[in-house]
Amino acid sequence: MGKPDFRMERSLIRRGVFPVAGVDEAGRGPLAGPVAAAAVILDPKSLPPGLDDSKRLTREAREALYDDILARALAVAVGFASAAEIDRVNIRQATFLAMRRALGALAAPPRHALVDGNDLAPRLPCPGEAIVRGDGLIASIAAASIVAKVTRDRLMSRLCAHYPVYGFSRHAGYPTAEHLAAIGAHGPCPYHRLSFRPFRPDGGAT
C-alpha cells in the first residue's frame, strides 16, 4: 500500500479552495476516556515527510511526526467528547461533536474538510467530504490521525497517574485482558464509558 499524498488538497487549492483541513478521530473503541478528533491544515510548501496512517506507524514514529506536524502545519486543533458525553449521545454522535470542535478551534477557518471514514458529521463549519480509509490516502487526514492518536494517548497516560489500577498508559482504555480484569476487581472510574460493555446490565453498547 502506498503512502498518503497531497494530490486531493492540491486539486482543491487549484480550484481556489483553501485552507483545506484533514480530520480524523482516535478512541472510538475504548471503554474509558474521551474520543478525540484532530483537524490539520498542512502547509503546501512544507509537508512533513513520512506521513502515514497512525495505525501503520510505531509509537516512536508517531511521536516524531507529531512534533514535525505541529512545527510545519498552518493550523492544528484537537477536539474532545468526554466519556459522559459519549454515554449521553452515543459514540457516533460524540465523534461528530469532537470533529466539529476541532474544526471550530482551528486558527485559520477552513474552506473545506477532508474527513476519514464513510460518515460525514453534520453541521460542520465548512463544506466537507468523507473519504473511506482516508488516513492511508490523504496527507492531511494522515496528519490528523497522528495528532489525534498521540494527543489522546498522552491524555490517557496522565489519567493513569490518577487511576493507576487500570493501566491506562499501557492500553489507552481499550478492552485488553488487563483492563477488563482491573474493571472486574475495582469497578469503573469516572472516566469509563458506562454505556459500553461490560458496564450495561443488558450487555449492550452504544
Image (cartoon, rainbow, N blue to C red):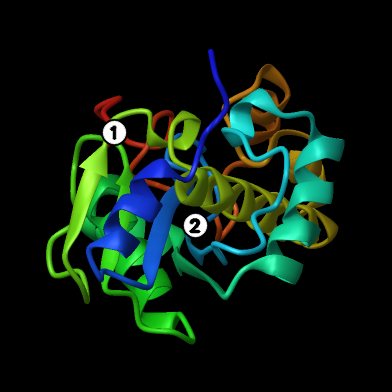
Query: Quick check: can you spot residue 87?
Result: no
For the residue pair 97 and 91, the one nearer the viewer reads as 97
Q: Residue 125 location in percent, x, y?
A: 22, 76
Which residue: 29% across, 36% down?
117
In the picture of the structure, the residue carrying the numbered disc 1 is: 205
Q: Position of residue 5 (x, y in %)?
A: 50, 38
Q: Residue at x 46, y 36 (%)?
A: 135
Q: Quadrant of residue 127 in the image?
A: bottom left
Q: CA distance from mark 1 to mark 2?
A: 19 Å
Whether 142 is drawn above or below 77: the answer is above
Which residue is more in the foreground, 206 or 153? 153
**Residue type indicated by callout 2:** Ala
Vertical side of 157 occupied by 72: above or below? below
In this view, the residue farthest toward the bottom is 107
Q: Earlier in the sequence, mark 1 or mark 2?
A: 2
Local secondary structure at mark 2: strand
Q: Residue furthest front?
A: 14
Q: Amino acid at mark 1?
A: Ala
Left or right of 18 on screen, residue 41: right
Q: Which residue is mark 2?
A: 36
Q: Residue at x 61, y 28 (%)?
A: 55
Q: Is residue 182 visible?
A: yes
Quarter of the image containing the C terminus? Answer: top left
Q: What's the mark number on residue 93?
A: none
Place residue 123 in its image quadrant.
bottom left
Most foreground residue, 43 or 155: 43
